[in-house]
Amino acid sequence: SYDDLSDGVWYLHMRARGDGGDWSETAHRAMRVDRSAPQVKITPDPTQLGNGGWFNKPVTFTISGDDGTGSGIKTIEYSFDGGSWLLYEGSLQFDAETPLTTISARATDVAGHLSETVSATFGLDLSAPTSVVDPGCFFSDLCVAEVFVDENGNEYLQLAGELDGALSGVGGVSIQIGEENVTAATDWGEDSWSYSTSTELGAGCHNFSIWAEDNAGNV
């Protein structure tokens, strides 16, 4: 018996010798040893993700199995969010907005070994977020634009607006005053943002550019 053969194809060669000392013809037998479970992998295209697994363009998932020198892959299965296992027969394509979803996959080889389950969580958000500045007041009695005076008599401007991060949620809010450098909003959440100027603007008309980015990278 052979107890320590590694995975792969082994050849057994046998012959017999009679009482007269003559040898028979040699018989040959191929044997495949498979002691190991296969591996499975989930690959997205494109591979670039936003925050938290979000994509902002259609994505295709390919599931592949590898059994090394073992008996070979027999089946690959996948499931969504812990649901029933489905036979994998081709790439999984997503071109419509999709909330966060977990794809799980597993593979079985010809010898009957089952791989460990692997998973990938993703979402598809094709819509840009909105940052709206409408007349009115928002959280903490903060209005669209107000001039505040600190204890030293310095005046500064505070802005606020409504915010909608669409499917993937808000990733950040940026402010630009005229041609100055872009800076982040002072405070923001899922439905509102605010910004306080840190430098003196001076008298006159000032243009503010405001844009939001969601977790999928849409601006």
Image: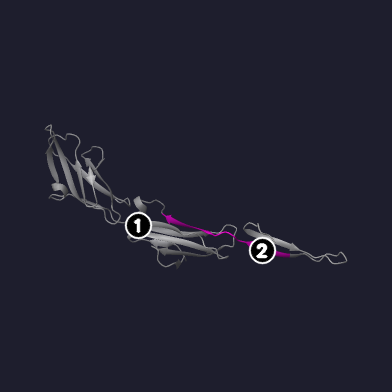
Residue 22 x/y as whole percent: 85, 65
Most foreground residue, 30 or 216: 30
Which residue is found at the position 35% from the left and 57% from the top?
123
* Residue 100 quadrant: bottom left
- The disc placed on residue 123 is 1
Check disc 1: other Cα within 10 Å, few if <14, some if 14-19, many if 20+: many
In the picture, measured across the screen, residue 165 lies left or right of residue 51, that is left
- The disc placed on residue 92 is none
Residue 193 x/y as whole percent: 21, 47
Label 2 sits on residue:
31
Which residue is found at the position 39% from the left and 57% from the top?
121
First to last magenta residue range: 28-45
Extreme-top residue of the structure: 152
Most foreground residue, 142 or 127: 142
Residue 2 x/y as whole percent: 68, 60
Separation of disc 2 and disc 1 at Cα? Answer: 46 Å
Most foreground residue, 192 or 49: 192
